[in-house]
Image: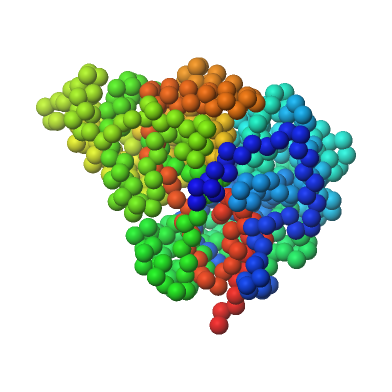
């Protein structure tokens, strides 16, 4: 497992010219000599706990959006289990010696699902709009100066400054290439492509019944002539984890994501099912407790430290996540060992210390035993809800009254990023393959002045931290870049606008009839092109 997770440390050679022009650009779905031969046809049905808000992850990279988007809309590259880039819409690429020019040769003969040709103009539009409006694109693509299209099958991304992480960010789910003609000159957030996407991928969007399900069908004109194998994909939205477990157990669905963790032991003993708890090395998901530092009480770092020490994160790991996760002690994943520093994130569970800090912060207990009250919001999800319930109980022990405010995902996003009607927030965020892309946005001061979903819910604003992130985003010396990220962690660990809690697992249960469900490093955000399912007997 560790060797798999060290993928994010890989450094690319700027002089590299990748000339992988094979017709089959993927290795993850390759069959061994002993493996059964794929069978074409059939319908794949799977259940998920959260409905997407958009069917293309163009300007909203929420995990549920990514997982659907990548089946319909492709990126320039994809990545194997060791994070080696492989061709997708780009067949080859060259990075200039100074790291400022990325030249991509595009796959000829590719058409969008509406019959229009895929060209470099679609790459230009997709990159520049995501640079301007994408929640991660504004960071990932910050150094992009322009995108040239010298001919229809050549796209050149020109940078003003180096971006040492760029070649790892071009996957279908992370930076999808959308059809520019579907967006025209209008507001991309109002485009019909959001809810009825047209892409170049192996599956064509057919139907989205809100609150119920969506349907994708095989793309007969896909550029990989022998893919996909499956004729139809039906995704059902099931909010109740117990109902998801029942659906996979009874064979109502072939794949289940979001099953109750309490059911996993029973499900794993079923010979017709397989539990896949592979680690998503692209997203590195984790849960965080975000403090609204604009709240006068929470503006005091001692209060934040006290709350951190009032929380038993080992209890969350052991009881809420059934020991299937690890406690997180820094926003940067431990597997990025060159960058990792948890030295200032030392807040052991200690109720007495928490009470003492609150007294020192000028928040004494009143006659009723309470010090103050907070509104706690949480991103929808069974484990997040259980975590919220635990936090209410834990903070009551130190005199903090917690009111839990819940709702569906649109309500959550509006409350946290628009109306800011919360005090503390449990969020699930991808730390991703590089701190500039995944971690910077958690603390980025630009998110205060230019609010975007998934960016800096705490409204933390530290110019020194912003400057360190700016330096690291363009630093080509590995040692200096590591020192910059370690200094960031030391500062935000002391100031603690955000408390890391635990890693968030990506657990899937599927029928043993299903093969090669994952064909990409980002697991559920693969494209299902290589997946196939045995007929029922």
Q: Quadrant of the C terminus?
A: bottom right
Q: Is residue 41 visible?
A: no
Whether residue 227 is situated above or below residue 279 in the rendered picture: below
Image spot of residue 175 (x, y percent): 66, 42
Q: Residue at x 60, y 28 (%)?
A: 478
Determine which quarter of the picture holds residue 171.
top right
Total labels: the figure holds 0
- Left or right of residue 390, residue 235 in this image: right
Determine which quarter of the picture holds residue 113.
bottom right
Between 518 and 31, the residue placed more toward the observer is 31
Image spot of residue 181 (x, y percent): 77, 44
Farthest residue in the top direction? 463
Q: Residue at x 67, y 54 (%)?
A: 72
Q: Residue at x 47, y 57 (%)?
A: 277
- Left or right of residue 49, residue 170 in this image: right
Whether residue 388 is situated above or below residue 463 in the rendered picture: below
Image spot of residue 419 (x, y percent): 44, 31
- Left or right of residue 377, residue 90 in this image: right
Image spot of residue 242 (x, y percent): 37, 62
What colouring style does the render use? rainbow
Whether residue 457 is situated above or below residue 206 in the rendered picture: above
Determine which quarter of the picture holds residue 301.
top left
Farthest residue in the bottom direction? 537
Q: Is residue 505 visible?
A: yes
Q: Residue at x 22, y 19 (%)?
A: 360
Farthest residue in the right direction? 151
Whether residue 527 is situated above or below residue 531 in the rendered picture: above
């Amino acid at each position: 497992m560790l060797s798999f997770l060290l993928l994010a440390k890989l450094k690319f050679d700027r002089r590299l010219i990748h000339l992988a022009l094979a017709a089959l650009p993927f290795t993850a779905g390759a069959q061994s000599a002993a493996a059964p031969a794929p069978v074409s046809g059939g319908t794949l049905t799977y259940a998920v706990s959260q409905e997407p808000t958009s069917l293309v992850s163009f300007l909203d990279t929420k995990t549920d959006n990514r997982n659907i988007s990548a089946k319909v809309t492709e990126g320039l590259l994809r990545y194997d289990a060791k994070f080696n880039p492989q061709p997708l819409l780009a067949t080859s690429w060259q990075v200039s010696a100074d790291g400022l020019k990325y030249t991509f040769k595009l796959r000829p003969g590719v058409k969008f699902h509406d019959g229009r040709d895929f060209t470099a103009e679609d790459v230009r539009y997709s990159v520049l709009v995501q640079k301007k409006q994408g929640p991660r694109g504004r960071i990932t693509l910050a150094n992009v100066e322009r995108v040239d299209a010298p001919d229809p099958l050549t796209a050149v991304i020109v940078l003003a400054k180096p971006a040492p992480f760029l070649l790892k960010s071009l996957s279908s789910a992370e930076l999808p290439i959308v059809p520019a003609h579907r967006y025209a000159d209008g507001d991309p957030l109002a485009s019909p492509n959001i809810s009825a996407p047209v892409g170049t991928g192996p599956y064509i969007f057919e139907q989205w019944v809100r609150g119920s399900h969506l349907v994708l069908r095989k793309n007969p004109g896909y550029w990989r002539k022998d893919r996909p194998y499956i004729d139809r994909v039906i995704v059902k939205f099931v909010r109740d984890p117990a109902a998801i477990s029942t659906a996979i157990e009874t064979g109502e669905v072939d794949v289940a994501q979001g099953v109750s963790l309490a059911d996993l032991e029973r499900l794993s003993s079923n010979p017709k099912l397989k539990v896949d708890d592979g680690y998503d090395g692209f997203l590195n998901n984790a849960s965080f407790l975000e403090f609204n530092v604009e709240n006068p009480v929470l503006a005091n770092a001692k209060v934040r430290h006290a709350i951190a020490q009032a929380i038993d994160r080992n209890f969350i790991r052991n009881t809420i996540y059934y020991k299937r996760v690890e406690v997180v002690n820094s926003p940067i994943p431990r597997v990025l060992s060159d960058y990792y520093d948890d030295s200032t994130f030392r807040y052991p569970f200690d109720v007495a210390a928490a009470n003492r800090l609150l007294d020192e912060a000028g928040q004494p207990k009143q006659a009723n035993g309470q010090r103050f009250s907070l509104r706690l919001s949480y991103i929808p999800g069974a484990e997040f809800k259980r975590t919220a319930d635990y936090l209410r109980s834990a903070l009551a022990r130190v005199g903090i009254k917690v009111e839990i405010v819940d709702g569906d995902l649109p309500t959550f996003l509006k409350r946290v990023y628009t109306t800011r009607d919360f005090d503390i927030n449990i969020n699930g965020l991808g730390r991703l393959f590089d701190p500039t892309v995944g971690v910077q946005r958690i603390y980025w001061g630009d998110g205060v002045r230019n609010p975007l979903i998934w960016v800096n819910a705490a409204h933390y604003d530290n110019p020194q931290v912003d400057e360190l992130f700016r330096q690291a985003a363009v630093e080509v010396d590995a040692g200096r870049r590591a020192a910059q990220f370690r200094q960031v962690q030391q500062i935000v660990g002391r100031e603690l606008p955000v408390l890391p809690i635990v890693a968030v697992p990506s657990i899937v249960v599927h029928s043993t009839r299903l093969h090669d469900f994952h064909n990409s490093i980002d697991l559920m955000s693969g494209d299902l092109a290589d997946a196939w399912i045995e007929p029922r007997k």
